[in-house]
Image (spheres, coloured by chain):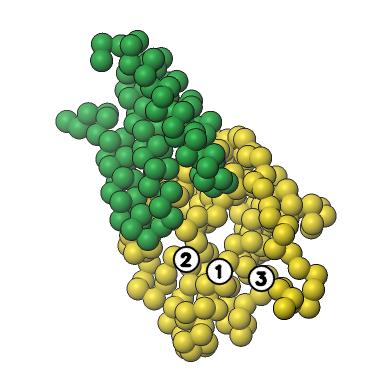
Chain colours: A yellow, B green
């Protein structure tokens, strides 16, 4: 699939079919995630895939942004202790967040190429999800991604092209 | 014995409580969005429990059609909310309340 086409056609899907997502597909998404760039090559992320219906329902109770009924939810976590050990303050406060976001974009584009719909979610209660998933204190959930075959795909929101500058810098004075 | 409605009500209450907590640090427009989503979920819960109502279904359809404008355009979302409230008035005349 053409990469630019995938970038421009991916949408935030919030309505899913009930069909489960095959496990090998989910594994390919995780693989796409771990090929993302990582600040200082720290790679302090870890990925949890939730597919059990009851577990997803519990996750939704603590995640107001997790909309629709996705058959799978990917939880991108960071090992905060490792992020700090490898990247010091910058690693813990900035790089691990950037890494999570870059991994998420890879996952969502790979999902699109597989015919899947996704939606990135940050509106959840991190401590609550950490406790629900029985994660140790140093593993923090950063991003949720709902995954499933789309039941409907929203129209693209408007994009503001005025912010694009081909000058050396923005604002000539 | 726990009635069948209790687990669904529990889910909804958890969603509302978590929303209340998270909204302290979120975009202010997410407040009305979560209230709308709660209304939609409540209508679905009642429907699953045998409470079928044309006017409730209509409200949910309108919510689903317009709620995601919150992600795109503040004015469109505000206009949608205004229209939704006004659309409730004729529905009030269709029931006992």
Mark 1 surroundings within 10 Å by alpha-carbon count, few (fewer than 14), some (14 through 19), many (20 or more) = many
- Between B89 and A90, the one lying in front of the other is B89
> Is tag 2's residue or tag 1's residue first in the polypeptide sequence?
1
The residue sitting at 61% across, 54% down in the picture is A26
User: In the figure, A156 relative to A141: above or below?
Assistant: above
Which quadrant, please, contains the C terminus of chain A? Answer: bottom right
Number of residues whose C-alpha sits closer than 10 Å to that of mark 2, classed few (under 14), some (14–19) or many (20 or more): many
Which of the pair B89/B45 is nearer the observer?
A: B89
On what subunit does the disc labeled 1 rest? A
> Mark 2 or 3 closer to N-term?
3
Residue occupying the point 41% across, 38% down: B37
Q: Do labels 3 and 1 touch, CB within 8 Å? A: no
Describe residue B13's horizontal placement relative to residue B27 as left or right: left
The residue tagged with tag 2: helix, strand or loop? strand
Q: Which chain letter goes with mark 2?
A: A
Measured as percent of width and height from the top left, residue B15 is found at 33, 45
Q: B77 left or right of A108?
A: left
**B27 left or right of A148 in image:** left
Q: Position of residue B51 (x, y in %)?
A: 32, 18
Reading the image, the residue beneath label 3 is A36
């Amino acid at each position: 699939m053409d990469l630019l086409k995938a970038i421009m056609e991916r949408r935030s899907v919030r309505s899913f079919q009930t069909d489960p997502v095959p496990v090998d597909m989910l594994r390919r998404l995780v693989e796409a995630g771990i090929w993302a760039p990582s600040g200082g090559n720290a790679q302090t992320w870890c990925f949890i895939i939730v597919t059990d219906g009851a577990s997803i329902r519990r996750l939704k109770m603590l995640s107001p942004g997790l909309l629709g009924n996705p058959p799978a939810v990917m939880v991108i976590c960071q090992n905060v202790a490792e992020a700090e050990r490898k990247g010091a303050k910058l690693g813990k406060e900035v790089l691990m967040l950037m890494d999570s976001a870059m991994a998420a974009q890879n996952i969502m584009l790979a999902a699109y190429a597989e015919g899947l719909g996704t939606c990135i979610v940050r509106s959840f209660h991190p401590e609550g999800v950490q406790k629900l998933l029985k994660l140790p204190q140093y593993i923090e959930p950063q991003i949720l991604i709902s995954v499933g075959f789309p039941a409907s795909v929203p129209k693209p929101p408007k994009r503001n092209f005025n912010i694009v500058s081909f000058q050396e810098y923005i604002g000539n004075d | 014995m726990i009635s069948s409605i209790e687990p669904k009500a529990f889910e909804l209450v958890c969603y509302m409580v978590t929303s209340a907590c998270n909204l302290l640090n979120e975009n202010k427009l997410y407040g009305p969005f979560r209230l709308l989503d709660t209304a939609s979920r409540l209508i679905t819960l009642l429907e699953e429990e045998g409470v079928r109502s044309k006017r409730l279904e209509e409200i949910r359809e309108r919510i689903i059609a317009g709620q995601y404008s919150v992600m795109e355009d503040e004015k469109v979302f505000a206009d949608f909310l205004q229209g939704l409230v006004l659309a409730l008035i004729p529905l009030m005349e269709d029931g006992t309340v």
